[in-house]
Image: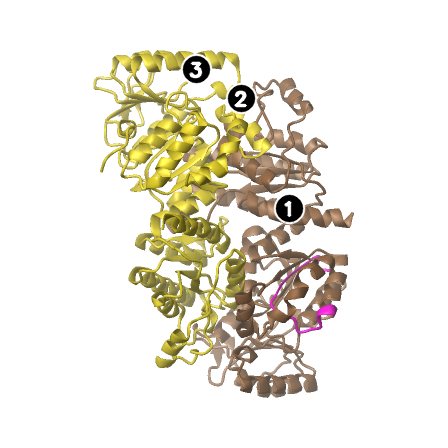
Chain colours: A yellow, B brown
Amino acid sequence: MSPGSLDFLFHPKSIAVVGASNNIETHGHNHLNFQILGGFKGPLYPIHPKQTEVLGLKAYPSLEAVPGTIDHVLVAVGINNVPDLLTQASKKGVKSMHVYSGRASETGRPEAKELDKEILRRVKEYGIRLVGPNALGLFCPSSGLAMGYDIPTQPGHVGAIMQSGANSTDLCHFALLRGVKFSALASYGNALDINEGDLWQHFIEDEDTRIIVSYIEGLRIDPQKYIELVRKAASKKPVIICKGGRSQAGARFTLGHTASNAEVAREIFGEPLKQAGAILVRNIDELLDMAVAFSFLSPIKGRKIGTGGGGGGNAVLYTDEWEEAGFELTPLPAEIHEEFKRRGSQMWDWIKNPGDFSVVAPGDPFDVPALLAEMAKHPVYDFIVGYVGEDFPFKIESLNNVMLYNAEGYIKVFKESKKPFFAIVRDRPLGIREMEGDRHKVYARIKARFLEEGVPFFSSVGEAATAMKHFIAYHQRKS
Amino acid sequence: MSPGSLDFLFHPKSIAVVGASNNIETHGHNHLNFQILGGFKGPLYPIHPKQTEVLGLKAYPSLEAVPGTIDHVLVAVGINNVPDLLTQASKKGVKSMHVYSGRASETGRPEAKELDKEILRRVKEYGIRLVGPNALGLFCPSSGLAMGYDIPTQPGHVGAIMQSGANSTDLCHFALLRGVKFSALASYGNALDINEGDLWQHFIEDEDTRIIVSYIEGLRIDPQKYIELVRKAASKKPVIICKGGRSQAGARFTLGHTASNAEVAREIFGEPLKQAGAILVRNIDELLDMAVAFSFLSPIKGRKIGTGGGGGGNAVLYTDEWEEAGFELTPLPAEIHEEFKRRGSQMWDWIKNPGDFSVVAPGDPFDVPALLAEMAKHPVYDFIVGYVGEDFPFKIESLNNVMLYNAEGYIKVFKESKKPFFAIVRDRPLGIREMEGDRHKVYARIKARFLEEGVPFFSSVGEAATAMKHFIAYHQRKS
């Protein structure tokens, strides 16, 4: 595996956290805590003017007081301290610094511009690479570097170039619920030194990164250079970009957020990027759906779906939604009817695409997984979708059995077939009372099984259809 | 309160369940269990050929063996028994029967048509009104009649006319998570006797029903008569309709589902219904979103939004999504800037619409609820939206405090302002591991508080925007 040019940034051997503290309300406390939770393998040095121990680790009054070498410095104190910290860091041979602190040029205030200049001057002089300011920072499961909690700490293959901390957090939190894993993520904020150009270059080179996702508000580099980087990336791996500040009010807002002039860059974020091979999405949910598709699915080249599951009324509506989104639920081929006749199913002439869960009769060889298995073997279908939803008047004990039986059947189809397969799991966010509910736990258990086996899933046909349109267009373009 | 013409159907004084059994795998067991869970107030009579006690209740071998009167009979045995059961029921003075059993005319088999005829002949002869066959049945919180579990058993004002059991179940399950409550629901299936016409007439008359929602596949009554009923209903209350079988494959499927020829009725389910005043939606999620809007929100007549919450990157994207959906995030009026200046906020010139949660500084009088409260007072905004999402590097203890503080602030704005207010709660469905997670419990607790106080909420701007378009158009049409 050939690593990318910023590999040193994602794999420091030691970290000092300036502003680390035992006060849980401080950012320094939390940033240090994230490295501990993330399982950072090297030494962690809390820097605090007075305390001698922070979060159970020996603390030091300054960078210079640290006995060992420091590769990376995380700054969670006021931005005015950064120039001095850079000078101190240079004496310790520090390679990189992440400045979490904001209230910088995004405020639009003149003194901030002066400070930016001074920081940049010292960064160049000392040869320290800087992430931020106003940046949530770095996440790398293989080194244990982390920028939050409830994040997927197992290494994976999605590289994320994110200009916003909020959207980085959302992406990581929701990725954990969907089985998406990262090679690395950089939430790079104001991009005073390390900018989108450096990060794209890194993730293009990094062979561990097989999918690139990005949230961007404004460009620091030349638009043509940016498009060329995206084109180069897209020629090697799937590239998904979400542009923030597409609307007038959104663009107004980005100025005060990451000091990005989103208006100026708006024109390149449509056709030119699509031409360069990027998939453009509207929000972090769509971005994550694409990461799910590219992480788990083999290529899909057509729009003919074989599907089943859920009761009749569910099946009617999901059929409508698929077809209205431009997909086709191709009628069941005669060979499949014949196969179920041969097996002695009383339902052989009645079953359809989609397969209706509510007509399953005890003892009859027709059930939804059996139908999907036949569809998965038949050349007419491009991909198979198993729907997980319940509508029957069940008692919870039998619901458990029936739902899990079907889910295990789907897993079998997924594993035994070469045809792309995913599930629609029709659960919805819970209230506090429902957390204890057995019915909701059945859905959650099914998803846990899907995650274990690598079965991708979506919450609705609408979401899946949007993702599949992009996914299929990508593979059609490639071939 | 004047009740509707089918009030006797939703408020029986006693129920016999034919097919009730202690075997939890049987539908009879579950249907009886639902009445017990639903809190049905009158006597329940399990009917079983051999057992003398079912689910703790004294059982009888036949309808005739029941000592008291029976108002309503629920049939969960094979459909071939229905003609005889009707004759037995007539001798007991039964007023209504619900036939859960399917495998009727939806199979397209000739013997089913004969059976239909015989059932209908006896229904007419005995004057018993029949729901079904192939119908999940009736739900009425004020009588305790129920057709499932995990359903909202508190009485409310949504009347639901549903041709599908699966979609009835989804609607009730998800309604519970969103605070929507029902006056009554009928899942009427094949509509051999009681059809959509009877049910619309009932819910038009029923003064307890203030909102009518409906899922329909095919018409049993004359299309013109149907449109007239919808027009009459829409002149009195909001009417939301989801048509199943809009697509070719969907229409094919409805034939085998509720024996509905959806093709024939397709043309009336567009413009003619809209002209009649109905709001047309594409699925049960959208239908429920409209029920949330009409249950909780005062009228909204324009598209100017004041909003805030979430970190900067969240705010950029939700701003884009609102504006792309045709709404306006009107810039913050000078008076509101001045008000925060007067209060001594350091942020007074920096704050915007949307209000960015991540620039809130300790001790500063600016915070998101304070901003929304000012927006709620200002005539420029048509409605106010509070976003619930977290992105800051928190420790869970402080996350709890900050999130709940903001949520309580939103509740205060909602209660103290006359301006319509709702929340976007950015949670997503959980896996089994996350059920124990504190972060997810914070969201779930916030929703519990919103439900207690009657604050409506949606999971995404996309969902809320679709609902608000319909909602605003409705109120513009009315005025």
| Residue A79 place in picture, x, y as percent | 42, 17
According to the picture, the residue beneath numbered tag 2 turns out to be B363
Which numbered disc, 2 or 3, marks the residue closer to the eye?
A: 3
According to the picture, the residue beneath numbered tag 1 turns out to be B468
Looking at the rendering, which quadrant does residue B119 occupy?
bottom right
- Real-space Cα distance between discs 1 and 3? 43 Å
| Residue B17 place in picture, x, y as percent | 55, 77
Q: Secondary structure at mark 1?
A: helix
Q: Secondary structure at mark 2?
A: loop
* Label at residue A116: 3
The amino acid marked with disc number 3 is Asp
User: Is disc 2 in the same subunit as disc 3?
Assistant: no
Looking at the image, can residue A31 be seen?
yes
Front residue (pair A330, B21)? A330
User: Is disc 1 in the same subunit as disc 3?
Assistant: no
CB within 8 Å, label 1 to label 3: no
Q: Residues within 10 Å of mark 2 (few under 14, many from 20)?
A: few
Q: Is residue A69 above or below residue A474?
A: above
Does the magenta-highlighted stretch encompass residue B208? yes
Q: Is residue A429 above or below residue B250?
A: above
Q: Secondary structure at mark 3?
A: helix
- Real-space Cα distance between discs 1 and 2? 36 Å
Looking at the rendering, which quadrant does residue A279 occupy?
top left
Q: Which residues are magenta?
A: B206-224
